[in-house]
């Protein structure tokens, strides 16, 4: 456990933004974390997982600690489910693959999402009809100020669409140490999301399995989402907005093809990618900051963009979408 000073975070964030952090350290045990938190330099602590949902817009004047807790274990099982605990520093997709190899069903639709296990409950990651809350059982987290361990069950996390208590009330207050998932012995296949059915048909799958679904999801994601190892990005930059049904009906008159999906409280979820594309941003590039050519919801760093350039681009997008559709897009990515 060493604290280094004034190093670049470029390789620690999937956007590949090159800024300096005042202090940086990693931890791979609870003791190491506790020692770090007791260090006199442990002010403004930011716990980083895979760095896949963050945009650095300026140097970080504090201590960044990278969670490297590793391990996956089967805690217990009942007649229907396996209770599987993964340490927060495990790579998310590696965990999904582990589940598929062991026939633990439930996370296959969440294949290939960048980031670590510890970050998954933070924003209730979701894709192709499944969210973390559907498979979540509990997590353990360390309070960054008083260093006590806390257990959070499903109801404690207040999961919502890309939301949890860790993005709101407890923002930057906890280091998530491990997450326990409740995974099914008998899979309940979720193929309702259109693209999955089409992809499975293309793959000529004769027997549906969690592995086949995972492969379909991997194919879909790789065909339209940029690989952060090649082009810097943080997945969807904005959330899909929820608008009142009356507003949707109004918009539908001028834009008959506007995609909207019924959501709770008589609201309609609109595909933000469509709104952004309609405003002409898809494929846009200024210096190294751009709007991805195959999925407008994803902002990209082609090499040396600064966080501020990406943020400015996102602001321009928000303004044009607001002017054209009277909808305010909300960022999904954490801005620092
Ligand atoms: N669309 C366009 N143009 C675009 C992009 C999308 O018109 O450039 C329209 C199309 O009508 C398409 C619809 O938007 O049918 C939905 O697109 P897609 O299936 O790609 O999903 P999304 O709503 O853009 C969300 C999640 C993704 C997740 C996919 C699949 C959010 C903010 N994003 O994207 O999550 O993978 O659904 O479930 O909810 C992430 O959060 O980082 C992420 C990648």
Image: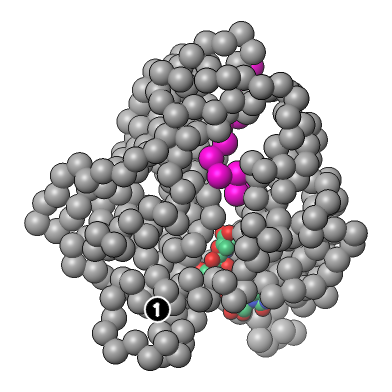
In this view of the protein, which residue sits in the foreground, 327 or 33?
A: 33
Query: In the rendered view, does 109 fall on the left or right side of 168?
Result: left
Span shown in magenta: 43-54
The residue sitting at 77% across, 66% down in the picture is 291
The quadrant where residue 26 appears: top right
Expressed as whole percent of the image width and height from the top left, the position of residue 320 reads: 83, 65
Report if residue 199 lies within the magenta region. no
Query: In the rendered view, does 191 fall on the left or right side of 307?
Result: left
Colour mode? one colour
Query: In the rendered view, does 86 fall on the left or right side of 324?
Result: left
Up-down: is 9 above or below 81?
A: above
State the residue lying farthest toward the right: 287
The quadrant where residue 18 appears: top right
Expressed as whole percent of the image width and height from the top left, the position of residue 141 reads: 40, 30
Residue 262 seen anywhere in this rendered image of the structure: no
Expressed as whole percent of the image width and height from the top left, the position of residue 165 reads: 47, 39
């Amino acid at each position: 456990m060493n604290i280094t000073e004034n190093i670049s975070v470029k390789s620690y964030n999937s956007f590949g933004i090159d800024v300096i952090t005042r202090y940086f350290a990693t931890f791979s045990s609870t003791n190491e974390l506790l020692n770090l938190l007791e260090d006199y330099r442990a002010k403004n602590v930011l716990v980083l997982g895979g760095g896949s949902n963050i945009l650095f817009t300026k140097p970080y004047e504090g201590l960044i600690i990278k969670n490297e807790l590793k391990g996956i274990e089967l805690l217990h099982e009942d007649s229907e489910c396996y209770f599987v605990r993964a340490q927060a520093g495990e790579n998310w997709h590696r965990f999904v693959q582990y589940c598929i190899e062991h026939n633990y069903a439930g996370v296959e639709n969440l294949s290939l999402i960048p980031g670590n296990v510890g970050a998954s409950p933070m924003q209730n990651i979701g894709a192709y009809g499944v969210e973390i809350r559907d498979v979540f059982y509990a997590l353990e987290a360390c309070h960054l100020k008083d260093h006590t361990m806390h257990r959070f069950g499903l109801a404690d996390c207040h999961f919502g669409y890309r939301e949890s208590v860790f993005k709101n009330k407890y923002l930057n207050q906890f280091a998530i140490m491990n997450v326990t998932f409740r995974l099914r012995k008998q899979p309940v296949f979720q193929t309702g999301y259109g693209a999955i059915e089409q992809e499975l048909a293309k793959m000529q799958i004769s027997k549906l399995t969690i592995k086949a679904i995972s492969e379909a999801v991997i194919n879909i994601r790789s065909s339209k989402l940029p690989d952060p190892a090649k082009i810097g990005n943080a997945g969807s930059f904005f959330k899909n907005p929820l608008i009142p049904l009356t507003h949707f009906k109004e918009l539908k008159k001028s834009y008959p093809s506007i995609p909207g999906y019924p959501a709770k409280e008589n609201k309609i979820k609109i595909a933000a990618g469509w709104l952004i594309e309609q405003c002409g941003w898809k494929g846009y590039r200024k210096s190294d900051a751009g709007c991805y050519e195959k999925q407008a919801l994803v902002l990209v760093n082609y090499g040396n963009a600064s966080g501020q350039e990406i943020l400015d681009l996102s602001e321009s997008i928000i303004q044009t979408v607001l002017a054209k559709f009277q909808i305010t897009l909300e960022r999904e990515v954490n801005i620092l």
